[in-house]
Image: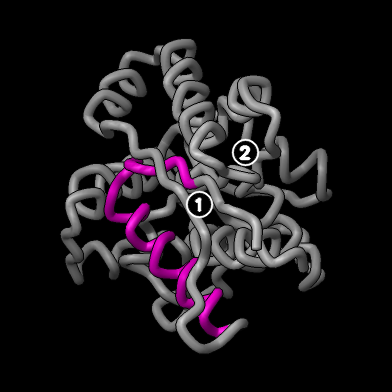
Amino acid sequence: MRTIGLIGGMSWESSALYYRLINQETKRRLGGHHNAASVMVSVDFAEVEHLLNAGDWDRLAAMMAGAARQAASGGADFLVLCTNTMHKVADSIAAAVSVPLLDIADVTAAAIRRDGRKRVGLLGTRFTMEEAFYRDRLRDGFGIDVRIPPPDSRQLVHDVIFGELCHGIIRQPSRERYREIIGELAARGAEAVILGCTEIGLLISGEDSPLPVYDSTDLHARAAVEVALGE
């Protein structure tokens, strides 16, 4: 079994979910008392949030690279960055270590393409929705057309993530509003929706959505187990 290196803390709510999903999937596959071999390096999300709002991607890249080096030095055979937004600096992470990074966008896109879908909606932080790095990777690498909500809806999705989900707060009115926004994406031609923030799965499941859901957290965690087990 390979050792999974988790870069977490963004937020710890979703990092805890990663840990649970990875170990549940390992036990499901291997049975008995098996769990995943892993190391986790958690950064301080308050500092990350400050740098995000300041647009200081250079310092964020340096922080993520430092966490990657810590995880690699702790014995990680490959890395899992437990957040979508920080994949904007994935190249800096990959350049900092000799072990590979399992990209969350690639894992999510591969699942979409396996299902034969080509037009999807994207929910995430405003950085993930509005910056080009995520949408371009899905388009250029997988031929997937990504559609995002209009500005007011993007802001609401973002505010719920930072103001509620990152604090473990789950509110039914926010769930209802997310459903409405997914419906808006369906009306714009989306065939499915990506839950492109690792906390959104705490609020929205497939049963809550008018469109098929691709939960990036769940897909990423399961892919990490596959890599760890050499599958």
**Disc 1 secondary structure class:** loop
Q: Residue 106 vs residue 71: left or right?
A: right
- Give the x, y percent position of residue 89: 56, 25
- Residue type at numbered disc 2: Tyr
> Quarter holding the N terminus?
bottom right
Residue 21 lies within the magenta run: yes
Residue beneath label 2, please? 134
Magenta region: 6-28
Of label 2 and label 1, which has the lower sequence position? 2
Residue 186 appearing in the image: no
Residue beneath label 1, please? 196
Q: Nearer the viewer, residue 146 or 169?
A: 169
Does the CB distance between marks 2 and 1 fall below 8 Å? yes
The residue at the point 61 percent across, 65 percent down is 225
Residue 178 lies within the magenta run: no
Q: What is the quadrant of residue 117 in the picture?
A: bottom right
**Disc 2 secondary structure class:** helix
For the stretch drawn in magenta, the main secondary structure is: helix
With respect to residue 113, does 98 lie above or below? above
- Give the x, y percent position of residue 112: 72, 64
Q: Nearer the viewer, residue 162 or 184?
A: 162
